Image (cartoon, grey):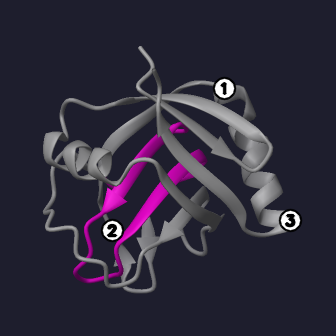
Amino acid sequence: MTDLRITAGAFTFGARFEASAPRTVAKFRSLLPYRERVIHVRWSGEACWIPLGDLDLGLGYENPTSYPAPGQIILHPGGVSETEILLAYGSVQFASKVGVLAGNHFLTVTEGLENLPALGKSVLWSGAQEIVFELVG
């Protein structure tokens, strides 16, 4: 099942919302279509992220993980570190300068997984890329 189309740089991915994070999904759906820039992580490993600073989305933790698998997208609701969205493309231990963090696993890439490493390398070596999340259908 595909709920979203994600266009990041030259790549397009399909993704589904995770029922185990209903408040995070509802909040993110209210922001769609969502357009931002994605950059490479600094501490976490093989991932790209969207820093959101002190944005308060009114969320707490639900379905949190510190070790998202490739294709899992998590949202850190803020607090000890800034609010952010992270897209794992390889091995990740989600962290910041304050240490290990957890984020709400609310989206999973279901189509185009084979292109995630290429996106990650493009962001790492070429810099920030535009990313767009849009509902399908």
Amino acid identity at mark 2: Leu
Relative side of 98 to 44, left or right: left
Question: Which residue appears at 52% of the width and 50% of the height?
Answer: 87
**Label 2 crowding class (10 Å Cα cut-off): few <14, some 14-19, many 20+?**
some
**Label 1 crowding class (10 Å Cα cut-off): few <14, some 14-19, many 20+?**
some
Position of 82 relative to 41 (above/below): below
Relative side of 87 to 32, left or right: right
Q: Is residue 109 visible?
A: yes
**For marks 2 and 3 on the same chain, the one whose residue lies earlier in the sequence:** 2
Q: Label 1: state its secondary structure.
A: loop
Q: Dot 3 corresponds to which residue?
A: 125
Label pair 2/3, CB-CB below 8 angstroms:
no
Q: Is residue 89 magenta?
A: yes
Question: Which residue appears at 68% of the width and 34% of the height?
Answer: 12
Identify the image quadrant of residue 54.
bottom left
Which quadrant: the N terminus? top left
Given residues 134 and 72, the one toward you in this image is: 134
Q: Label 3: state its secondary structure.
A: helix
Q: Is residue 35 magenta?
A: no
Residue 11 x/y as whole percent: 74, 38
**Label 3 crowding class (10 Å Cα cut-off): few <14, some 14-19, many 20+?**
few
Question: Which residue appears at 16% of the width and 58% of the height?
Answer: 61
Magenta residue span: 65-93
Q: Label 2: state its secondary structure.
A: loop
**For marks 1 and 2 on the same chain, the one whose residue lies earlier in the sequence:** 2
Residue 105 x/y as whole percent: 32, 45
Q: Dot 2 corresponds to which residue?
A: 101
Q: Dot 1 corresponds to which residue?
A: 112
Q: CA distance from mark 1 to mark 3?
A: 20 Å
Q: CA distance from mark 1 to mark 2?
A: 27 Å
**Mark 2 or mark 3, which is nearer to you?**
3
